[in-house]
Image: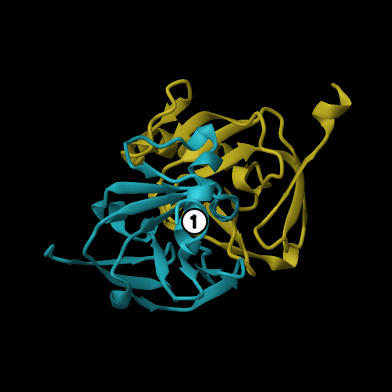
Amino acid sequence: MSATANRKKSGMCLCGAVKFRAHVPDSAIQLCHCQQCQRWTGGGPLSVVRVKDVEISGQDMIQSYHASAHGERAFCKVCGTNLYWKMQDHSITFLPVGLFDDQNGMDVREEIFVDRRPNWLPAHQDANQQDEAAMQAQLRDFLEGQS
Amino acid sequence: MMASKQISGSCLCGAIKVQAKVSKPALRACHCEMCRKLTSSMFMSINTDQDSIQITGNVAVYSSSEWAERGFCRTCGSVIFYSTKEDGARNLSAGLFENAAHAPMKMEFFSDNCPSAYALAGDQEKLTAEQTIALFTGEGDNG
């Protein structure tokens, strides 16, 4: 692996109180159209990119909220930036695209909860499309794998 | 004269409740860098009658620039509004309302800053960064 591919990408929230660095292995954007994400972001999709080995500074500026029995949503206490969604008691696997200083090459590869996608957002034809039923099935499989 | 409609909504956790009247239903998408940082993708607002807006609950307000503030829920982090300091006008998040209150998409701000990942459908008016700034400041070629 080249040094460039191995380099972590950096980013931060709107006010800069929370900063992070992370590996972005495949630049794959996932758009989530679920109603919880729409309420959270103001109405657009939650747009996240797959990440590994996340380092965060400003941890005490992060507030978490459990909107469901499994999910955790985190935001900056100072500016309200949507920071991440993750499974409770698991590490961060996706971070919002908007946080990154360099978003070059990031491309939509997956859309989830597509039955909730508003009519003004066209589907990405080449991206994997998952509806709510498929996502519920994935969650069940994941939780069964845990127990 | 078009009849106005009363709409009500809430943040994700329900701590913030909003009510407003809508006379000219319209959704607006903002693609500026600050909105994309805050929301991950774009900020969607709904046009409501300014004097009709009622917000209950503990909204945190962040001053994001000399001219604007952003409101969010202290409990769940939902984006509640974008407001301009000079006139106090508040642009409520469309996502607070079920199906964005069925308002049609009418306008895109900072359209030249929109990444291809979020290119919208429809023939709504698109204002570039320069045109958007001119609209709100009254400066520049577009008056």
Q: Residue at x 60, y 50 (%)?
A: B33
Q: In the rendering, at what x and y percent does residue A23 appear?
A: 76, 37
Q: In the rendering, at what x and y percent does residue B24 appear?
A: 23, 60
> In the displayed structure, would residue A87 be above or below residue B84?
above
Q: Which quadrant would residue B8 be assigned to in this image?
A: bottom left
> In the displayed structure, would residue B98 be above or below residue A60?
above
Judge left or right: residue A103 versus residue B127: right
Look at chain B in the picture and name its colour: cyan
Q: Nearer the viewer, residue B90 or B127?
A: B127
Q: In the rendering, at what x and y percent does residue A33 appear?
A: 42, 43
Q: Which quadrant would residue A3 be assigned to in this image?
A: top right
Kind of residue indicated by mark 1: Ala
Judge left or right: residue A4 versus residue A35: right
Q: Residue at x 61, y 70 (%)?
A: B66
Q: Chain of mark 1?
A: B
Q: In the rendering, at what x and y percent does residue A7 appear?
A: 83, 34
Q: Nearer the viewer, residue B83 or A82?
A: B83
| Pointer 1 residue | B134
The crowding category of the residue bearing disc 1, from other C-alpha atoms within 10 Å (few below 14, some 14 to 19, many at least 20), is some
Q: Secondary structure at mark 1?
A: helix
Quadrant housing the C terminus of chain B: bottom left
Q: Residue at x 42, y 22 (%)?
A: A125
Can the viewer see residue A54? Answer: no
